[in-house]
Image (tube, coloured by chain):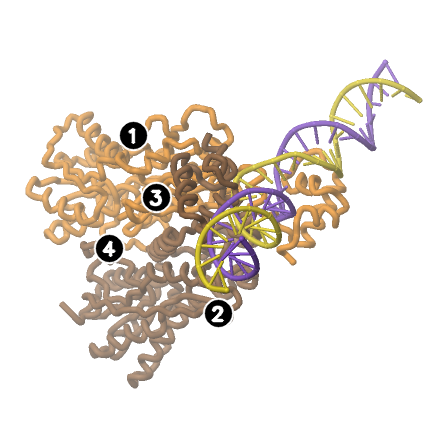
Chain colours: A brown, B orange, C purple, D yellow
Amino acid sequence: MDGKLTLEKIGSLAGVSRATVSRVINNHPNIRKDVRQRVLQVIAETGYQPNQAARSLASKRTGLLGLVIPRLIQALFTDLYYPRLIQGISQACNESGHTLALFIFHTDEEEQQLAAQVLRQGFLDGLIIAGMHFSDPLNQLLLSEKPVLVIGEPLAYPQASFVDADNRLGAYTAVAHLISLGHQRIATITGRLDMAAGQQRRQGYLDALTEHGLPIDEQLIVAGDFEQEKAYQGTLDLLPHQPDAIFVASDSMALSTLRALADAGLQVPKDVAVVGYDDLMAEETAVPLINPPLTTIRQPIHRMGVQAVQTLLDIIKNPHTPPRRVILPTELIIRQSCGAVQ
Amino acid sequence: MDGKLTLEKIGSLAGVSRATVSRVINNHPNIRKDVRQRVLQVIAETGYQPNQAARSLASKRTGLLGLVIPRLIQALFTDLYYPRLIQGISQACNESGHTLALFIFHTDEEEQQLAAQVLRQGFLDGLIIAGMHFSDPLNQLLLSEKPVLVIGEPLAYPQASFVDADNRLGAYTAVAHLISLGHQRIATITGRLDMAAGQQRRQGYLDALTEHGLPIDEQLIVAGDFEQEKAYQGTLDLLPHQPDAIFVASDSMALSTLRALADAGLQVPKDVAVVGYDDLMAEETAVPLINPPLTTIRQPIHRMGVQAVQTLLDIIKNPHTPPRRVILPTELIIRQSCGAVQ
DNA sequence: ATGGAGTTTGAGAGCGCTCTCAAGCTCTTG
DNA sequence: CAAGAGCTTGAGAGCGCTCTCAAACTCCAT
């Protein structure tokens, strides 16, 4: 019986036409109050739910927003960045009455094949792409006519709308903090340099040193690529050059760094201070699970997700307007690993 | 131009009718080889993509599978269970040509309101519900006519189809292992007892003790509810009763336990052995980030996701068949925290 | 009363696809 | 070579909704 309900039927039950019921459902103005009431009444009584497919066909809107997560995704397993982001996106979708379609690509092939699928007409109202890097085949998605928003500035596509946190300033702040604590030989373990997050954090590191009159020492810069193994090895590689502090471009890598330092018999922050990036570890829980608790730059990940949806909806509503560039602030979270507090 | 392509148009370009093109696209048999070739050719040349809404309307199938994650979700932020699960589900969706719609509920209200939404006709072909507990309002979803599959045995609904890992046997194995190492006073920190996972792991613990002739000591059983804070406190509460080993019902809680033991000046595994559950920590990375590395019961989380989709698709295909009950095996992963190896 | 502006409603034409039905073909086989 | 048994194809009827258009109705100022 549920399956048999249609606009037509609701209409005849309420003594009005299909068109009127449609108007009520879609909140059109200019409906007599009592009529609207009567229709709503019938809808409530019958438990009628409009058929989404028919709606989409007629209106060209599906209420579906796509979230595309590319293949790199070591990260999906090792840290909580994506869960947080998805959380924010999902919440904003719920609030705006949209449904979130999730596309996680696992192989290059999938990425190639499904990218086209994702764009097929009449399927998604808009698209959010997270974690793209320069050579990503997903770039083709940016060229489509569909409204697209990228999370993380896509440096290769200045025309793309995006939401990001201020990576450069965040990194700058972290390093400036270390400098203010008197550190002189500050090393960094960078993220992937083919992503804005990696590149810009590295730039923030460089800027902070330069502006405070400290020399740039290439030996104190190692590539971590946002991978824990590389960060572990990178940390060991740094030690001969005697850094007194390390700025690590992600918390997940910073864990490896702490581990490597411990394995090398060094104490944090006494021998080496460490500052991370992301604040993924402890935000939600009162128990400090890593030792020492990590000083870090907090990104408003959840808010980035919410913002992404809001911005995307704005693009959908006003298609022929200039690209949006939303950059959210970060925050220095001081804990013990930098030595600023006991 | 892309937007103007229809079956009709492809048909006229290929010199056949709309119906024939439709058959080609849907892989019907009984099409002359050369005709099929010609049509595929035109489709490839034009880049035509069928309109999903129209398709759904006519065929009553949308290709959308829903994944519902209830509100409890402390866990979504603190451990990698859900990311792994989503990963598996997503992969199976990609492989079967389905699209994953993600519903994460953040408040009770949302859960109430959106649950109905989720079920609206012509929207989802089927539904996967993860992490339900007994009094969950989502239970109403189980009563709908839509094909539903639950991840984690829903004890209150014996008629529901589900996929789960063998919680009881997993826990049994963990505790039996501790017993085999000579431990006598084995404590446990349980999960939520209003979820099968919590209840059954507790049962496995009890069974192992009983079958090996060890007494049940209620003072050695504390509730952790899968929450890190409670596990931390619970561990401290256990100490006066001098356990020589602790079976913790999740890795994420086990981290808290390790921390609490360290804070209390106890050494693992020398003073107290610890075994966790889930193996969420280290599977993907070569760097052991926690100390000591955790002996644990590995659940095939990814495979559970894949299995969930496959089973759901089977239910969709064969609706009027008995409920599916899929229980996957677990595996004891021996590392250092139990003291079995150096 | 009467004209006109504004409000409220219904009829009807799609949206682009699937699927049934029957017609037209191509083969066998006796 | 005719008859019957598949194959292969096209016509046409929806699927359930949105949206335009114009009719009908309301209300007020004249």
In this rendering, does residue B206 appear at all?
A: yes
Q: Could you tell which of marks 1 and 3 lies nearer the N-terminus?
A: 3
Please state which amino acid type lies under the numbered disc 2: Pro
Q: How far apart in space, not on screen, are marks 1 and 3 (Cα)? A: 24 Å
Please state which amino acid type lies under the numbered disc 4: Glu
Q: Do labels 1 and 4 share a chain?
A: no
User: In the rendering, which numbered label is found on residue B286?
Assistant: none
Q: How far apart in space, not on screen, are marks 4 and 3 (Cα)? A: 26 Å
Q: Which of marks 1 and 3 is in front?
A: 3
**Where residue A331 sits in the image (x, y, percent)?**
27, 69
The answer to whether the residues at label 2 and label 1 have Cβ atoms under 8 Å apart is no
**Where residue A261 sits in the image (x, y, percent)?**
25, 64
For mark 1, name the chain.
B
Q: Nearer the viewer, mark 4 or mark 2?
A: 2
Mark 2, other Cα within 10 Å: few <14 / some 14–19 / many ≥20: some
B185 relative position to B202: left or right:
left
User: In the rendering, which numbered label is found on residue A284?
Assistant: 4
Q: Which of marks 4 and 3 is in front?
A: 3
**Where residue D11 sits in the image (x, y, percent)?**
74, 37
User: In the rendering, which numbered label is found on residue B113?
Assistant: 3
**Which residue extends farthest left?**
B240
The answer to whether the residues at label 1 and label 4 have Cβ atoms under 8 Å apart is no
Residue nearest the observer in this picture, A192 or A186: A192
Q: Do labels 3 and 2 share a chain?
A: no
B150 relative position to D11: left or right:
left
Question: Residue tagged by mark 2?
Answer: A323
Q: How far apart in space, not on screen, are marks 4 and 2 (Cα)? A: 34 Å
Label 4, secondary structure: give it: loop
Q: How far apart in space, not on screen, are marks 2 and 1 (Cα)? A: 51 Å
- What residue is at 21 percent from the left and 69 percent from the top? A338
The answer to whether the residues at label 3 and label 2 have Cβ atoms under 8 Å apart is no
